[in-house]
Image: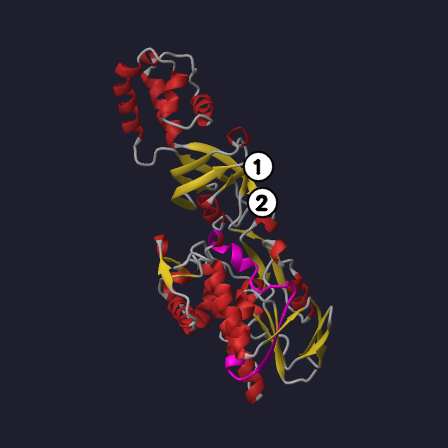
């Protein structure tokens, strides 16, 4: 093999963007991917539909990136969400924006995004090799090659885009952390973000899906750290679903904070309106047991839980229900609480929070400040966002920044940073 080329490690979103960008800038590029196919994680994003970005401004996108969002300002400004949309439509993939400005392919097929990238990589002349990187070869403070299970690949520049630890079945097994550490980088302990939550008291409700409910999560202070309306699901271990995954991104201090999930089963009604409804129902259901009546308000599995939490006996006839009992029921329906004990393992997370310390990476170029010729992009870095396409936007813009900078570095022999 010859030198004078860029080696990109990782064929996910950031890696493919980096490889394509560097090649289009004139560099010879080899893309190493351990899986037989590129973009495996992309296949499962957005429930297989690929929520590839968010139709918003740079400032709005950065506001949805709680972890080191300022670090991304340069890369995001150079390749904003509108740039991502124009890029993929330029590859022949029509896009659409849905609720929350989430952007998807019109076809609702993640495969269209992957196929378009793969075809572009092939057409551009990127060499794609199925290989697992095992080590970086370093000499005099710069990277010179990537060792793999199929041999060594000499390089004038290397872009690490190996992903984090989430969804290891797709190849995200944390290999990149060790590679970065071998070049002197510090890795902030990775853990899950956008991840299901373990919570007490959920087992009896396993399998129950709730739509159009409100979820608020509080810590030690009464003001919620998260509040949103939507859908969630009870499991044997706790809670999952869109609301819960979004909430998890806001819960970052399990070591010093105690969190509680508050579910409002009737977000459109105040407690007073709920009590008034019960009073109106007295005439129609006067002789019905409360245990039966409660099922007109909540799903079957929730009935006994609501009664137990409110402290009201289920065999009470509705006409005998006291004002205090009605109030207790209304308050429970408006605030069903479950203590959160922690997140599920990082392997179940959509994205990883933690990773390579961004203080050791140049924000405009994604260049390592510690190792010449090394660039880092995507989920490997200690940056992550909320749901809505923001994490893929991070991948696209950091991958592009790394590709541009690495190509310029080897063509001009200029400033690495």
82 sits left or right of 355 in the view: left
Q: Residue 344 got which mark?
A: 2
Residue ID at (55%, 89%): 412
Q: Nearer the viewer, residue 327 or 105?
A: 105
Residue 22's spot in the image, x, y percent? 53, 78
Residue 69's spot in the image, x, y percent? 46, 63
User: Is 35 included in the stretch rendered in magenta?
Assistant: yes
Residue ID at (64%, 82%): 156
Q: Residue 176 got which mark?
A: none
User: Is 101 included in the stretch rendered in magenta?
Assistant: no
Tag 2–tag 1 contact (CB < 8 Å): yes
Between discs 2 and 1, the one toward the N terminus = 1
Q: Which quarter of the figure has residue 356?
A: bottom right
- Placement of the C terminus among the 4 image quadrants: bottom right
Q: Residues within 10 Å of mark 2 (few under 14, many from 20)?
A: many
Q: Which quarter of the figure has residue 90?
A: bottom left
- The region drawn magenta spans 23-47
Q: Secondary structure at mark 2?
A: loop
187 sits left or right of 204 in the view: right
Q: Nearer the viewer, residue 165 or 296?
A: 296
Compared to residue 233, the image places residue 271 above or below, namely: above
Compared to residue 408, the image places residue 278 above or below, namely: above
Residue 31's spot in the image, x, y percent? 61, 73
Residue 147's spot in the image, x, y percent? 72, 72
169 sits left or right of 43 in the view: right
Which residue matches tag 1? 237
Look at the image and tell me whether residue 402 can be seen.
Answer: no
CA distance for labels 2 and 1: 9 Å
Look at the image and tell me whether residue 407 can be seen.
Answer: yes
Q: Nearer the viewer, residue 33 or 332?
A: 33
Q: Secondary structure at mark 1?
A: loop
- Placement of the N terminus among the 4 image quadrants: bottom right
């Amino acid at each position: 093999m010859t030198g004078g080329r860029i080696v990109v490690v990782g064929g996910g979103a950031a890696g493919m963007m980096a490889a394509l960008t560097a090649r289009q800038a004139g560099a010879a590029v080899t893309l190493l991917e351990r899986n037989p196919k590129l973009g495996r994680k992309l296949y499962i994003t957005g429930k297989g539909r690929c929520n590839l970005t968010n139709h918003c401004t740079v400032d709005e996108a950065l506001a949805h990136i709680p972890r080191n969002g300022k670090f991304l300002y340069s890369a995001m400004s150079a390749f904003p969400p509108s740039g991502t949309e124009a890029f993929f439509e330029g590859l022949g993939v029509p896009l659409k924006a849905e609720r929350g400005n989430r952007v998807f392919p019109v076809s609702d097929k993640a495969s269209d995004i992957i196929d378009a990238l793969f075809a572009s990589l092939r057409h551009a002349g990127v060499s794609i090799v199925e290989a697992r990187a095992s080590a970086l070869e370093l000499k005099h403070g710069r990277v010179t090659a990537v060792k793999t299970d199929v041999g060594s690949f000499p390089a004038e520049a290397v872009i690490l885009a190996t992903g984090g630890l989430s969804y290891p079945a797709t190849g995200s097994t944390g290999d990149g952390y060790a590679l970065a550490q071998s070049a002197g980088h510090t890795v902030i302990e990775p853990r899950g973000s956008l991840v299901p939550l373990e919570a007490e008291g959920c087992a009896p409700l396993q399998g129950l899906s709730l739509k159009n409910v409100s979820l608020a999560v509080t810590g030690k202070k009464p003001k919620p750290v998260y509040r949103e309306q939507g859908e969630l699901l009870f499991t044997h271990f706790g809670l999952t679903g869109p609301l819960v995954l979004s909430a998890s991104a806001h819960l970052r201090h399990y070591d010093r904070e105690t969190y509680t999930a508050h579910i409002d089963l009737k977000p459109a009604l105040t407690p007073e309106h709920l009590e008034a409804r019960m009073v109106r129902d007295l005439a129609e259901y006067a002789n019905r047991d409360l245990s039966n009546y409660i099922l007109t308000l909540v799903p079957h599995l929730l009935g006994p839980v609501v009664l137990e939490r409110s402290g009201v006996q289920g065999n009470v006839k509705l006409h005998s229900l006291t004002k205090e009992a009605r109030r207790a029921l209304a308050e429970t329906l408006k605030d069903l609480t479950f203590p959160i004990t922690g997140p599920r393992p990082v392997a179940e997370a959509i994205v990883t929070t933690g990773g390579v310390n961004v203080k050791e990476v140049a924000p405009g170029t994604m260049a390592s400040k510690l190792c010449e010729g090394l660039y880092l992009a995507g989920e490997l870095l200690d940056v992550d966002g909320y749901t809505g396409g923001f994490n893929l936007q991070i991948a696209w813009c950091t991958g592009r920044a790394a590709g541009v900078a690495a190509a310029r570095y080897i063509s001009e022999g200029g400033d690495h940073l």
